[in-house]
Amino acid sequence: MKITNLKQRTNLMSCIDSCLLRQLICVAFVLVSVSGCGYSQKSLIDRKINSIYISIFENNTFVRGIEFDIAKAVKDEIISRTSLRIVQKDSADIIMTGEIGDSVQAALSQSRDNIVESSVSISAKIELLDTRTGRTMGGGASGGAAFIVDRGENVHTATEEAIAILARNLVNSLEEEW
């Protein structure tokens, strides 16, 4: 198709210009939206804080040994998501203490004779002490996970998942506090 008429060429060029302008506006909008959303790949913890000591949480539940699992999960989460070093208590910038308040297993659905779906929920509170200033802050979080008996899932795997979620939420609250 040959365009011979000057008016047709002008219309075609204005259409192309209009399409390019729309695309540029869309790209600019996306870039502004993404850059303005507050997303950051770096840790939100103050850069002056370099180290943390994590104590074994106080266990106020009837579940034995859960305090060790939660402390390990919190340490793993801090190592993977922050630039903090985990150190001994006497050389830490921040000391984290915690208390496990609740660990509940509940039936979500059941058949006539058996539980079909159940859940595990764990909650904890933390206190952060800045050893340099003496300032303390507290926070809390919970984590929960469901399991379906018919699929071969069990309370142990649900507890592990709930602990991982709790640790993630505690580190989130740590970042929010500082």
Image (cartoon, grey):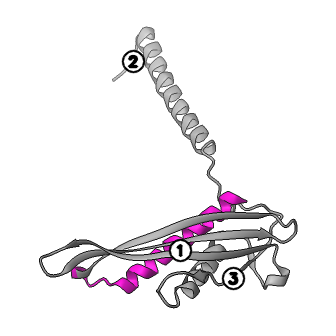
Mark 2–mark 3 CB contact (< 8 Å):
no
Label 3 and label 1: CA atoms lie apart by: 16 Å
Residue to which mark 1 is pinned = 101
Query: What residue lies at 61% left-to-right and 82% top-to-bottom?
Result: 58
Residue to which mark 3 is pinned = 55
Pair 2/3: label in front: 3
The circle on residue 11 is none
Label 2 and label 3: CA atoms lie apart by: 78 Å
Tell me the kind of residue under disc 3: Ser
Query: What residue lies at 66% left-to-right and 57% top-to-bottom?
Result: 176
Q: Mark 2: few, some, or many residues within 10 Å (few <14, many ≥20)?
A: few
Image coordinates of residue 88 in percent, x first then y, are 78, 85
Asked whether 166 falls inside the magenta stretch, the response is yes
Tell me the kind of residue under disc 1: Gly
The region drawn magenta spans 150-178
User: As rendered, which of 134 and 147 lies closer to the eye?
Assistant: 134
Pair 3/1: label in front: 1
Quadrant of the snapshot with the N terminus: top left
Q: Which quarter of the figure has residue 138?
A: bottom right
Residue 168 lies, with reference to residue 30, above or below; the image says below
Q: Secondary structure at mark 2?
A: loop
Mark 1 or mark 2: name the one nearer the start of the chain: 2
Image coordinates of residue 64 in percent, x first then y, are 50, 90
The circle on residue 3 is 2
Image coordinates of residue 165 in percent, x first then y, are 49, 71
Tell me the kind of residue under disc 2: Ile
Asked whether 22 falls inside the magenta stretch, the response is no
Pair 1/2: label in front: 1
